[in-house]
Image: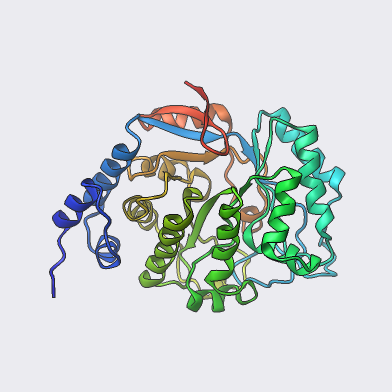
């Protein structure tokens, strides 16, 4: 059996060679945290030589909290018929986007529950009206599982739904709903969302149609290290196939008010998050960007993550309700984003959804 050592992995990564799952498991479990940080940072600067960290001015509103999927990690959703369930009209959503646009947002990440009472035309109208009324805003709408619900309600295929969204003016998809791309875990967390391939197939079809999308991972619940590696492996293989992912965004599970809360002994520690950022930068050698999350992990941890291989600081998130439902609230402003990045030793730059540079400080 070949002995794995950090120096061998380091030499491979810095030479641009791909590390394998066994080597990735070593980095996740055994590598010194600061050694791993230095390696991930070197890989980051090999890919992006500029000491620049980007962020996007955005908002993350929701159009409905009614959902039939019953994910055990979610505190946001309400069952159909619940007194506090809601589904916004198109005009109500447009008002949320208008407020975000007035604050300078160039991206709106719109998502909601899986509400079988909403017809496909509603979603298409949201995209068309956003493009018509707010041409400066990119409609970064609807996760893979929402697209699957649209297909179920409309009777169209996944591709058919995506074609109609594209015709309406949508060209990007957010990566939410991936959780952990391990069938063993998904059966316990989100049975009704289907296996890993259900998420992957939506992004595959989207990429084939010319969409770009992000990839995410929610960890720190019931997964094991092998599940983390399976998740990253799925993403790397799909990116080899399509090249459609712009960024990878991991965050730790927030258990407050969720059905899963009694089964979680403790939250994922910041060191676990930093190790995940660094590992993903080294392992996902074909994904352009890795995003540090000031929002989900706290501003200080987010700043430190910029020295663990991350090159993006996420968005301003003027509105966010899903984490708030779990009693996790974190807010910022454009001015604070710039300051946080500068304090970390990097040059702040505002970007678009597709990582075009809008402004540098």
The furthest residue to the top: 361
Nearer to me, 67 or 9:
9
Name the image quarter holding the N terminus.
bottom left
Residue 360 or 156: which is nearer the viewer? 156
Count the numbered circles shown: 0
Residue drawn at (71%, 66%) of the image:
157
The image shows residue 190 at horizontal and vertical percentages of 60, 73
Occupied quadrant, residue 232: bottom left
> Which residue is located at x 58 percent, y 32 percent?
333
For this view, does 234 lie left or right of residue 179? left
Residue 281 image offset from top left, x and y in percent: 35, 50
User: Would you identify the image quadrant in which residue 135 lies?
Assistant: top right
Residue at point 38%, 51% (across, down): 277
Q: Is residue 29 left or right of residue 217?
A: left
Q: Position of residue 345 (x, y in %)?
A: 35, 29
Give residue 133's quadrant in the image.
Answer: top right
Q: According to the image, what is the colour scheme of the structure?
A: rainbow
Give the vertical position of 316 relative to 269 (above or below): above
Q: Is residue 196 above or below residue 87?
A: below
Foreground: 65 or 354?
354
Query: Could you say where residue 101 lies in the image, as x and y percent from the top left?
Result: 71, 31
């Amino acid at each position: 059996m070949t002995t794995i050592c950090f120096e061998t992995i380091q030499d491979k990564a810095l030479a641009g060679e791909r590390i394998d799952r066994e080597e990735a498991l070593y980095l996740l479990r055994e590598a010194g945290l600061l050694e791993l940080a230095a390696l991930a940072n070197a890989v980051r600067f090999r890919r992006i030589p500029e000491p620049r960290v980007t962020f996007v001015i955005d908002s993350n509103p929701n159009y409905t909290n009614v959902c039939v999927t019953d994910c055990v990690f979610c505190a946001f959703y309400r069952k159909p018929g619940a007194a506090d369930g809601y589904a916004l009209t198109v005009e109500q959503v447009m008002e949320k986007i208008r407020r975000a646009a007035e604050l300078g947002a160039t991206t709106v990440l719109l998502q909601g529950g899986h509400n079988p009472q909403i017809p496909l035309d509603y979603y298409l109208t949201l995209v068309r009206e956003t493009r018509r009324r707010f041409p400066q805003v990119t409609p970064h709408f609807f996760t893979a599982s929402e697209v699957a619900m649209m297909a179920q309600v409309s009777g169209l295929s996944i591709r058919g739904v995506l074609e109609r969204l594209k015709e309406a003016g949508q060209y990007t998809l957010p990566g939410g709903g991936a959780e952990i791309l391990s069938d063993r875990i998904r059966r316990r967390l989100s049975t009704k969302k289907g296996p890993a391939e259900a998420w992957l197939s939506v992004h595959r079809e989207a990429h084939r149609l010319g969409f770009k999308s992000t990839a995410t991972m929610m960890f720190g619940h019931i997964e094991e290290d092998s599940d983390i590696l399976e998740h990253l492996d799925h993403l790397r293989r799909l990116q080899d196939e399509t090249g459609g992912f712009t960024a990878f965004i991991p965050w730790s599970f927030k258990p407050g008010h969720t059905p899963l809360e009694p089964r979680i002994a403790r939250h994922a520690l910041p060191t676990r998050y930093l190790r995940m950022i660094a590992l993903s930068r080294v392992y996902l050698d074909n994904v352009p960007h890795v995003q540090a999350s000031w929002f989900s992990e706290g501003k200080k941890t987010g700043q430190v993550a910029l020295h663990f291989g991350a090159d993006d600081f996420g968005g301003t998130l003027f509105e966010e309700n899903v984490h708030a439902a779990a009693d996790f609230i974190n807010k910022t402003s454009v001015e604070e984003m710039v300051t946080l990045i500068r304090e970390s030793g990097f040059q702040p730059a505002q970007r678009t959804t597709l990582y075009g540079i809008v402004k540098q400080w």
